[in-house]
Amino acid sequence: KLFGPDPRFKYIVSAMVLTQIVSLYVMQNQSWPMIVLVAYCFGGVINHSLMLANHEISHNMAFGYGKPLANRYFGMWCNLPIGVPMSVSFKKYHNLHHRHLADDDLDPDVPTLLEAKLFCTTLGKFIWVCLQPFFYGLRPLFVNPLPVTRLEIINTIVQLTFDALVVICFGWRMLAYLLIGSVLAMGLHPVAGHFIAEHYMFAKGFETYSYYGPLNWITFNVGYHNEHHDFPAIPGSLLPELKKIAPEYYETMPQHTSWVRVLYDFITDPAVGPYARIKRKSLDKPKPSAAAKSAISSNDSWKSSPAVEQKKD
């Protein structure tokens, strides 16, 4: 009974998009220091939340599995304040993450060997965290590029049109405000801690963590990550209900208690880094065309993953 879209979701997302558009009017005459500060503390938080809304939309949580095109186009609307076209592409590669979790060839979330070797020191990991939006966004294009689809082209046209309108109506500094917020909030930022908390191996042999803290309130409960991988057809708003229904499976599992602590431990602990991931080799690596077809067309269920070591503040 928990499966299916949350009827409130599309209204919450639309309110966030409109809030960002209004903020462009408010911020257009502010100084650069104020623009950067507000981008980090406010605009970037909304943009990161919209990225996670796109995560929900990639699972068709706006209109349900019966209306895939409606979900894709709503994702483009949700994408607008982020500044860079990503909604349709994210769904394509995110399918691979669920279907081939930790697969060294197919999961775009697994860092490359080059990343692991270059960013293995404390300073290196600090730089890697700051540059996380670029690694996260570009890695799939190098590791396992998939064919560009018609919807991706439409997504790009819609996004570039919106960006041009922002420049025309509010000036290029407001486009920079949106982009700066997106980049900063994906890097060294409290809400970005979920990128590392979800699957980086803080305890040997375990790969998926959950987090049940207050930052879930502004991230569509992405912290309920074990629950999400077990049941990706349940919207984020109902994942706490899943945890209540099956406490014997989730309450006893190790968990993170702070995304800020996750970032700190990741950077300072020599035993943790981009290399701290479980990696699996495909027994039969599918041909690129087969992987692309699977990623683009599939809306089926996915396999689940275990959780890992508890980290406390």
Image (spheres, rainbow, N blue to C red):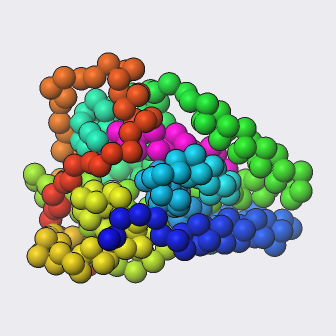
Question: Which one is nearer the viewer's eye here, 67 or 124?
Answer: 67
Q: Where is residue 133 in the image (x, y as percent from the top left)?
A: 50, 48
Q: Where is residue 118 in the image (x, y as percent from the top left)?
A: 34, 37
Q: Which residue is drawn at 65% across and 67% down?
A: 14
Q: Residue furthest right?
A: 168
Q: Is residue 295 left or right of residue 305?
A: right
Q: In this view, does 37 lie to the left or right of 312?
A: right
Tell me where residue 211 sits by quadrant.
bottom left
Total numbered circles: 0
Q: Position of residue 161 (x, y in %)?
A: 79, 44
Q: In this view, does 176 lie to the left or right of 261?
A: right
Residue extent of the magenta highlight: 83-98
For residue 212, above or below residue 202 = below
Q: Where is residue 122 in the image (x, y as percent from the top left)?
A: 32, 53
Decide whether residue 117 is among the magenta residues: no
For residue 282, above or below residue 45 = above
Q: Name the quarter where the N terminus is drawn.
A: bottom left
Q: Which is the main secondary structure of the residues drawn in magenta? A: helix
Q: Residue at x 32, y 19 (%)?
A: 287
Q: Name the quarter where the C terminus is drawn.
A: bottom left
Q: Does any portion of residue 265 appear in the rendered image?
A: no
